[in-house]
Amino acid sequence: MNRRDFIKRVAAFTAFGSVVSNNILNGETILANQAVNISLNKKPNFVFFLVDDLGWKDSSTYGSKCYETPNLDKLAKQGMLFTDAYAAAAVCSPTRASILTGKYPARLHLTHAIGVPAQTDRKLLAPNWTQYMSLNEVTIAEALKPAGYISGSFGKWHVEGTPKYYPSLQGFDDTSFERHIVDKFYPYYTNPPYPEGEEGEYITDRLTDDSVKFIEKNKDKPFFLYLSHYAVHVPIQSKQELIDKYSQKDECNCGEHRNHPYAAMIQSVDESLGAVMDKLTELGIDDRTVVIFMSDNGGLSSVTSNAPLRSGKASEFEGGIREPMVIKWPGVTKPGTVCSEPVISTDFYPTMLEMAGLPLMPQQHVDGVSIVPLLKQTGKLGREAIYWHFPHYHSTFVTPWSAVRKGDWKLIEYFENEGDARWALYNLKDDIGEQNNLALTNTAKRDELKSMLENWQTAVGAQIPTVNPNYNP
């Protein structure tokens, strides 16, 4: 079903409800409305809390001794923490598209951060990739709408090329900011064409306020809140009192995490999470609200450390794609549980549909798998492998790559290289830091995963970089 057919179905559903209501007498209408309200109230609310560039280790929840995230700690105690959760890309736009559509970025041909210029002086040329999320895609917000959900998108969108692809045209009823550009976080923010923030207004706090108002406004309906923070992306700007706090903390002056403004930004994001969770509790709807916490890619290596994971944002290594992820599903997921099965950002779409008791849409979220069995602890996913594809350059050290993980094994393909140098094979169970390339010593496993990766690239129509005829070494 394409987006146009889906919207027609929604319109027919709404019209049918209107006709039925208009043909019911007063007393029966009241009973019918009560029945509808009861039915809607049984459906869970969804809060999707997405952080930009937050690394796997960038929280006390995942082991940092510098960064303080008591609210994420609390959420993890109330839900399930994932140790092997992945973004579908190592940069922001593709991952966001995968969340909203349930499809791999390679299938969408949306494989890089929108707005980043192509590098034309390198050995390979990037393909002509799509710099927007097509309106033909049925987003998760649109999929929830027939069940009565109200959806709000607050903060960074970054799957658009022009305003005609903004969230208000992709199923979201309430939005703010929409654009992906932020010049300043503090002491005021700029995000054209929206009004400039007032002196002392931190953009993280503003998005929190907007989200809390959305929750209050829709507390009696099933809602989907997509809160997508600009933090902790550069520019690294934070409140001075928090910077001072971390500059005086011993753990932030030694070891791997010692960036005081970055630590302060993380605290502000965590406070945002706390404010949203407190509002849910205050309104008495926390027991029927699913809270999902995730980052869109790995931490930026020049700002933080993803150790023991190798490298960071944009990289093919675990530091670029493995993410902190926590899900609270009240009354279903056992509090304080930990899951080590690999999951990926395409999985949110079918998972949310199943949580809401709605039929799955496999032709839409073709690359996603519902992780409800993991959340219920009733079984495994039965998925053979997960994949990535980045046919681009990023800065000076990341060259075009593709990768597959099957079980504990991960194979990386480097499109610039030839022969044996084209492949790197790692056993993540024994070598989480990806220091020991086994591609030449375990050729059987290398060739097995190589065949899987190539077949997947063909199946999804992955765009492959081409030789640059004007390349001058």
Image (cartoon, helix red, strand yellow):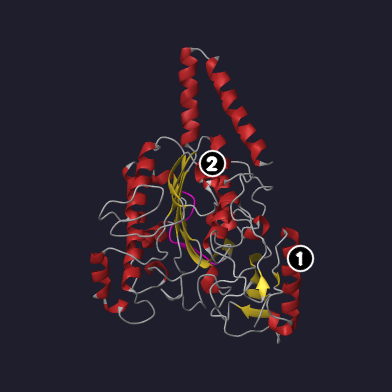
- Which circle marks residue 473 in the picture? none
Mark 2 or mark 1: which is in front? 2
Q: Earlier in the sequence, mark 2 or mark 1?
A: 2
Is residue 462 left or right of 145 when viewed as pictured?
A: right
What secondary structure is marked by label 2? helix
Task: Please name the predominant secondary structure of the magenta segment in the image.
Answer: loop
Q: Which amino acid does the dot numbered 2 rest on?
A: Leu
What secondary structure is marked by label 1? helix
Is residue 56 left or right of 371 when viewed as pictured?
A: left
Q: Residue at x 75, y 68 (%)?
A: 454
Say if 318 sits above or below 383 in the image: below
**Residue 47 in view:** yes
User: Residue 116: percent from the left, percent from the top?
Assistant: 54, 63
**Callout 2 crowding tier (Cα within 10 Å): few <14, some 14–19, many ≥20:** few
User: Residue 252: percent from the left, percent from the top?
Assistant: 31, 76
Near-viewer residue (97 or 444) = 97
**Residue 69 in view:** no
Q: Is residue 338 magenta?
A: yes
User: Residue 447: percent from the left, percent from the top?
Assistant: 75, 77
Distance between the alpha carbons at the discs numbered 2 and 1 = 35 Å
Mark 2 highlights which residue? 169
Q: Looking at the figure, which quarter contains the C terminus?
A: bottom right
Say if 195 sits above or below 187 in the image: above
Q: Does the magenta stretch include residue 34?
A: no
Q: Residue 302's quadrant in the figure?
A: bottom left
User: Residue 50: percent from the left, percent from the top?
Assistant: 46, 56
Q: Residue at x 62, y 28 (%)?
A: 12
**Callout 1 crowding tier (Cα within 10 Å): few <14, some 14–19, many ≥20:** few
Q: Which amino acid does the dot numbered 1 rest on?
A: Asn
Q: Looking at the figure, which quarter contains the N terminus?
A: top right
Which residues fall within the magenta stretch? 330-340
Mark 1 highlights which residue? 455
